[in-house]
Amino acid sequence: MIALLSAVVFLGAAGLDYATARYFAAVAARQPHHAGMWSVAMYLVGSLGYLSVVEVSAWLMLPQCLGLYAGTQLAVRRAGPGT
């Protein structure tokens, strides 16, 4: 059970960090609708991840941190140079 939850936390954290990067890109591009949608995604995914760490186990911080790193890598690589 904890392995499945770790995978969910990892993917959720990666999604959170990806959404954060897309949010800042939308703000920089002055796209309020897109920024707002990414903001909502950040809140929903982030809340679930943090609740799992607090309610289930502090050890879930490890997959959460790894997921945050992976999400940043994905967002930066998808953005490409100069964007």
Image: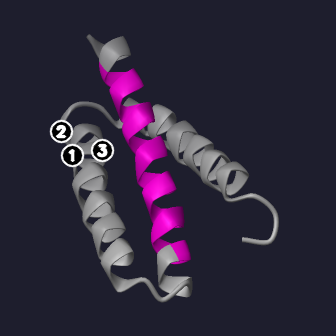
Quarter holding the N terminus is top left
Q: Which mark is residue 51?
A: 1
Which residue occupies 22% across, 31% down? 56
Compute the Cα span from label 3 to label 2: 10 Å
Compute the Cα span from label 3 to label 1: 5 Å
**Residue 25 in which image quadrant:** bottom right
Assess whether mark 1 and mark 2 are in contact (beta carbons under 8 angstroms): yes
Type of amino acid under label 3: Gly
Q: Which mark is residue 55?
A: 2
Q: Dot 1: within a 10 Å radius of its alpha carbon, few (fewer than 14), some, or many (20 or more) residues?
A: few
Q: Is residue 15 left or right of residue 46?
A: right
Q: Which residues are magenta?
A: 5-25
* Magenta highlight on residue 3: no
> Of all residues shown, which one is farthest toward the right?
81
Assess whether mark 1 and mark 3 are in contact (beta carbons under 8 angstroms): yes
Type of amino acid under label 1: Leu
**Label 3, on which residue?**
49
Label 3 residue SS: helix
Q: Is residue 74 above or below residue 23?
A: above
Which residue occupies 48% across, 43% down? 14
